[in-house]
Amino acid sequence: MADMAVEFCGIPFKNPVVVASLETTNSPDLMKQCFDYGAAGAIVKTLTDMEDMARLTQNSKYAILNDRGDIIKGKVPRDFVFYSRSGYSSTYYKDWIPYLKEVGAYARERDAHLIGSAGAKEVDGWKDICRTIEDCGLPMVELNFGCPHPALMPGVHGGSMISQEEDIAYEVTRQVVEAVDIPVVVKLTPDQSRPVEIARAVQKAGAAAVTATNRHTGFAVDIEAAEPRLAGTAGIGGTWVKPLTLRWVHNIYTQVGIPIAGTNGIFDHRDAVEFLMTGANIVEIGSVLMIKGMKWLPNIIGGVERFMDEHGYPDVESMRGIASRRAAKDYAEQFARDRVHAVVDEDTCQNPSCTICIQMCFYEALSQSPAGKVEVHPETCIGCELCMDVCPFDSIAMRLTDEAQFEAGYFDIPDGVYEGPEKFVTRRNNMKTIAANSPKTAAEAAE
């Protein structure tokens, strides 16, 4: 059985799954449920001295959307869109003291950790909230530089606004690090173009790790009512955002080297594995718990463990960052890799009934044969893999192009880079061309 234990910021975690700071950690009972269902950690909903952010939580709204942009009724699919507005904890941070102590002890009894989260108006507030968290015996604090909502509130400066400015992010982090003796983690926003630079800045300021990332800010429209969902701009997330988040996890892992808590885009264990393989040390689970409930946690935790067992990973560390380390550093390195070309399995191909691969080949490398087969033209096949992706019968594979095939005329980058215009005359993926060459069309015409 795989070893699920990890170390993050010098603290041992029994598994890499932590519940993020959101509504599911907004009360002592909810946080206890996180630990009862197996989470190695839970981050309390951000504690604050910002009245506006507490008021925002009292005005929370949610729109859980499907891939059509409609409100989901009933069972939530994997590709849901989580559109919402919500603030920080609506209970004053000082009033949390006895509950932080109580739940912290509850977590320790279950070999888990309650983690603090802070968001304040001024630097002194940041320091005081973090000292309060430390005094309650919590082993770590996350600075919420990622929340998208403060930027939408008049007169409020916090959350994602801090994470967009290196100097401010550095200074707030530095002063908090100097004020407490527990590890400080900085939660980043994706609403910017420089998360890597911000990660470097807070690392220099003494942050032990970063969380990549909070949710984006979006705008969703109800086209039937001709009005915005939730009356306007709000935070937005879901599995659709995962590749965007993983980009920053990858870049921070490869370019900065600071420990990472990965979040934003996780639905099930496969998503968690992607974050770990990209370089995250732990993962934070958020929105999915608000639509699936705490009972969803064991599915993620157990799923990660099963995946590791099935794929021969003895521990999380052997899996962490493996995809990022195998990634090309840039497009030039990708171009230097071996070329491939398409091969069609005629035994499973359903041509001429199906011609989707020909229609989707925009490089004129596939055509309809009068014999009722897909013909590959390797001299123009650049190995883009689109035909393989759209084939519903798994009948197309990519094969390495060898030297003999290059000599025989298989596609290679021409010396002058630019190709001649002669390929424009083939019109192989034009439906009229396909129909003219199709025995299916000929048979239908004969009838």
Image (spheres, rainbow, N blue to C red):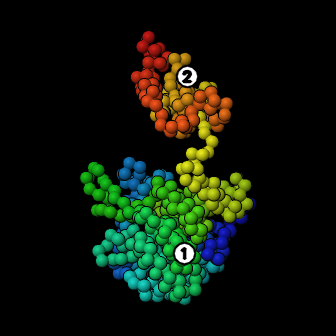
Q: Is residue 44 visible?
A: no
Residue 203 circle label: 1
Give the left or right position of residue 310, taking residue 124 as reference.
right
Ranked by sequence position, the earlier of labels 1 and 2 is 1
Q: Which residue is mark 2?
A: 373
Q: Amino acid at mark 1?
A: Gln
The answer to whether residue 352 is visible is: yes
Q: Answer few, some or many: residues within 10 Å of disc 2's Cα (few below 14, many 20 plus, some between 14 and 19).
A: many
Looking at the rendered structure, the secondary structure element under dot 2 is loop
Which residue is at a point 48% across and 71% down the rendered structure image? 198
- Give the quarter of the image for residue 307: bottom right
**Side (left or right) of 4 relative to 64:** right
Looking at the image, residue 155 lies above or below residue 283? below
Disc marking residue 169: none
The amino acid pointed to by label 2 is Lys
* Left or right of residue 278, residue 2 in this image: right
The quadrant in which residue 319 appears is bottom right
The residue located at (35%, 71%) in the rendering is 151
Q: Identify which residue, 243 or 94, lies in the foreground.
A: 243
